[in-house]
Amino acid sequence: MVRSIFVSVSGNFEGKLFVQLLALIYRSYIKKQMDENGLYKKYTMQTLLDDLDIIELYRQSKKLIISF
C-alpha cells in the first residue's frame, strides 16, 4: 500500500523516499523467503510482520539481548 508523503523540505522528501525504498526491498525479501519456505500456509504477510514486530534488540553493557 502506497501512502501520500507530505513534507515541508525537499531533503525530508528524499529521506522519506529512501526509507520507503528500503522498506520495499525488505518486504520483497520477506515475501520471497515466505514463498520459498512455504510460510504462507501458516502466516499471512501481516501476521508474520506482527509476530516480528514484538522482537526487540538492545544492548546491556557488552551483551546483546533479544526480547520477545
Image: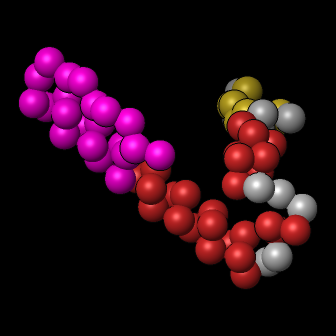
Q: Is residue 40 magenta?
A: no
Nearer to the camera, 3 or 32 = 3
Is the residue 20 above or below the residue 33 in the image? above
Q: Residue at x 82, y 68 (%)?
A: 39
Residue bounds of the magenta highlight: 1-21
Is the residue 4 above or below the residue 31 in the image? above
Q: Is residue 20 magenta?
A: yes
Q: Residue at x 83, y 33 (%)?
A: 67
Nearer to the camera, 56 or 24 = 24
- Image quadrant occupied by the C terminus: top right
Residue pushed farthest left? Answer: 10
Instruction: Determine if residue 45 is in view.
Output: yes
Residue pushed farthest bottom? Answer: 36
Nearer to the camera, 63 or 58 = 58
Nearer to the camera, 34 or 62 = 34
Is the residue 39 above or below the residue 68 in the image? below
Q: Residue at x 11, y 23 (%)?
A: 9
- Whether residue 58 sits left or right of residue 20 in the image: it is right
